[in-house]
Image: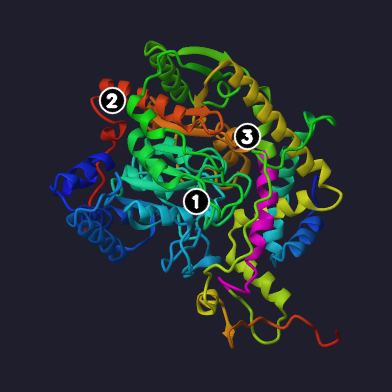
Amino acid sequence: MPSITREEVAHLARLARIELTGEELDHLAPQLDQIIDWVKHVSDVAAADIPPTSHALPLTNVMRADENRPCLTPEQALSGAPAAEEQRFRVPRILTEEA
Amino acid sequence: MSDLTRRTAVELAELMTAGEASSVEITRAHLDRIAAVDSAVKAFLHVDAEGALAQAAAVDTRRAAGEKLGPLAGVPLALKDVLTQEGVPTTAGSKILEGWKPPYDSTVVQRLRAAGIVILGKTNMDEFAMGSSTENSAYGPTHNPWDLNRIPGGSGGGSSASLAAFEAPLAIGTDTGGSIRQPGAVTGTVGVKPTYGGTSRYGLIALASSLDTPGPCARTTLDAALLHEAIAGHDPMDSTSIDQPVPPVVEAARRGDVNGLRIGVVKELGGEGYQPGVEARFHEAVELLTKLGAEVVEVSCPHFDYALPAYYLILPSEASSNLAKFDAMRFGLRVGDDGENDAEKVMGLTRAAGFGAEVKRRIMIGTHALSSGYYDAYYGQAQKVRTLVARDFARAYEQVDVLVSPSTPTTAFPIGERVNDPIAMYKNDLCTIPSNLAGNAAASFPCGLADEDGMPVGFHVMAPVMRDDLLYTVGAALETALAEQWGGLLLSKAPELEVSR
């Protein structure tokens, strides 16, 4: 049985917001299966009493004083926008008719 | 004065201090070299000739005015295209960022500017730094100057190739799983991954935030140390930046004294899967260090065997989250915005069109590893392996000062050879990944050519957290001893590139 099926890969693509073609799915699904089959060996050594490490070095939260500091102008912030209007990012509609 | 491109950064700085060459002359010589050879090497995605000459002229003016300048002022550099430079196109090797001009400088770029270092342009890389060959760049691969049919390593293949092709004396890379060290190894150049948090990630387009580390690339150990010093140190803009003094890397590179240094050869990083020519050069280098007074022992790090699969769970998990920002709303590509499609549809179409195959693969693996029902089995287990790898290092450093291994299991392979076999490609990073998981400092130094193919071999040194200076101690000792054998740097053996007009 594969570690991951073509249907699961299609579901993942929807979660990741990537519109894959059928051809891409055919190509990706066996590759992902092979990769997942390989990476799951991590379970061979990771016993229950081992604490997880999310970060190489101990971390403490970093705060800064709540003061005004120089920042990007609206023009700079919008300079890379695919579309802008009235000093705002213009985005496609987010609601459907029925909503 | 075409030989200006053959000089080290230190030599160029001396010429400028002595008034024998200006930064404008030096910069122009490198721009000419890029024009002559980059159509074959393809190290650069963008050459900022005008900007570079303006920066160079500014340094010359300051020098003429008697201002005290840093040791690398006026020396040109190639910048990996994953770091933002205000107003200069920054793509991270991806179509989704084609044409994007960042509105701000990364901390690394700010520090390069403060040091008077001249930025020639942006270098090619695997898309979002995912890869070991630059074949995943959306703009086509970079070619290894030692053999144009072979890969220059990756992800920072453009930076290392620019050094080996004498297009720049200095370069910046970023290392998440080996992206500075592996390209350094396969191009016969020096590549250093500082301690995680030793250099700032502000303005670095994130791949895996708990692993990403910017660092110096150069042709000599001392040049790399000077660049390391210029870019390293605490940065309040990066919450994981270490608030401690930069380790004395330049002093270590100048001394290069390994007498009494305890060196551990990692047992697990050798043997099956390692090219004979790589192992031969590696063991000769170890012998050389012994002759120079180092004490060499074998050390076992049993969990290093699991570092690679753990990395290929941790990295995609972090990457899938980091790359969620490419949503077609605020910057970058937007596809399918026809007034009918809703935002979600536009997002899906844009990401399908803007991301390459490897990026899609890793986003999907990461999404899977983090999804409910699988999180504990994959991501959780990988984080435990990370603990085990860090413990292996800690135990090893009780016995020895540094650990060593080959930098890569093989030399540069032919372009195209591994593109359809992701796991074979991932194995390039076998030796480099443990240091990313544990956050310690590590570097690759040239140690000769493999007999089978005449391609460069890298010597990998791993030092404890914030002991980056030890990397330079070993690198400098090795470089001096090998230069005596070879009658110069390894790169002096590289074939001449055909010059086009």
Number of marks: 3
For label 3, the residue is B438
Q: Tell which subunit mark 3 falls on.
A: B
For label 2, the residue is B483
Residue located at (76% from left, 44% from top): B379
Q: CA distance from mark 1 to mark 3?
A: 28 Å
Q: Tell which subunit mark 1 falls on.
A: B
Q: Amino acid at mark 1?
A: Glu
**What x and y, as percent, mark residue B353?**
60, 68
Q: CA distance from mark 3 to mark 2?
A: 32 Å
Which residues, given as a range, are shown in magenta? Answer: B311-333
**What x and y, as percent, mark residue B404?**
51, 23
Q: Residues within 10 Å of mark 3 (few under 14, many from 20)?
A: many
Please determine whether, in this image, residue B242 is positioned above or below residue B297: below
User: Is residue B457 covered in magenta?
Assistant: no
Can I make out residue B43 in this image? no
Q: Amino acid at mark 2?
A: Ala
Nearest-to-viewer mark from 3 and 2: 3
Residue located at (43% from left, 47% from top): B231
Q: Residues within 10 Å of mark 2 (few under 14, many from 20)?
A: few
Q: Tell which subunit mark 2 falls on.
A: B
On the picture, is A89 further left or further right than B152? right
For label 1, the residue is B135
Q: Amino acid at mark 3?
A: Ala
